Amino acid sequence: MQILHDVGVPGSKMLYLLTYQPRDFLVTTDLFKKVVDEVVEMGFDSLKITFVLAVHALRSMNKSTWEKKMETYEKWGWSKDEILVAFKTYPWCMMMSEEKIDKVMDFLVNKTGFETSILAKSKIISLSMEKRIVPRSLVYQYCLDNGLMNDKNHFSWWLLSSENLFIKRLKRYETEAPGVLKFYQEKLDHAN
């Protein structure tokens, strides 16, 4: 706790780590300090929850596993800088298995045609394929095909918005493209 305190982590964030990831503290002081120093060097803000999430991410995997995940993202065209930006935005992106990363990237890049650079700047990689990514991506494509939108600049909003906000958007589109809500519900039902 002193190591975290020394780099400016607030007590509430330390408590979060202690409560939800207590195993992170079950190492030698030197090893824990090394991980914290690495997170500091990466430029994480010690006042934000992403700092302790990054500590957890680095503590929960060995260097070999980290490198495999880096290679997986690089295989999809992400640069080391893009991977670091994604990690700083959402540390859980490195907690996903290589299989999950490949599955999400394959669907979004190869099946829906989205640029990998768009995906690197959001939390999309951690979402459920069946309950969020596939149904909303198909509805997004449906809306593009029906002229409800004219570009792909708002794709991450479609995946990251709350269910209520998402349904409100679809209700607005329902007058111009009747059936969009039904189409979405069918995709959700198919996922479940």
Image (cartoon, rainbow, N blue to C red):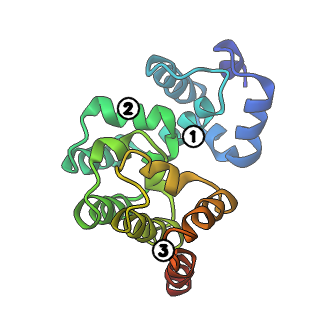
Return the mark for residue 140.
Answer: none
Q: Earlier in the sequence, mark 1 or mark 2?
A: 1
The amino acid on which the numbered mark 3 sits, given as a three-letter code, is Glu
Whether residue 128 can be seen here: yes
- Which image quadrant is residue 143 in? bottom left
Q: Residues within 10 Å of mark 1 (few under 14, many from 20)?
A: many
Q: Which residue is mark 2?
A: 84
Does 114 sit left or right of 135 as displayed? left
Q: Position of residue 140 (x, y in %)?
A: 43, 63
Vertical order, 43 against 60 (above or below)? above
Q: Is label 3 in a helix, a strand or a loop? A: helix
The amino acid on which the numbered mark 2 sits, given as a three-letter code, is Leu
The amino acid on which the numbered mark 1 sits, given as a three-letter code, is His
Is there a contact, CB below 8 Å, between mark 1 and mark 2? no
Q: Which residue is mark 3?
A: 130
Per the model, the C-alpha gap separating discs 1 and 3 is 27 Å
Return the mark for residue 56.
Answer: 1
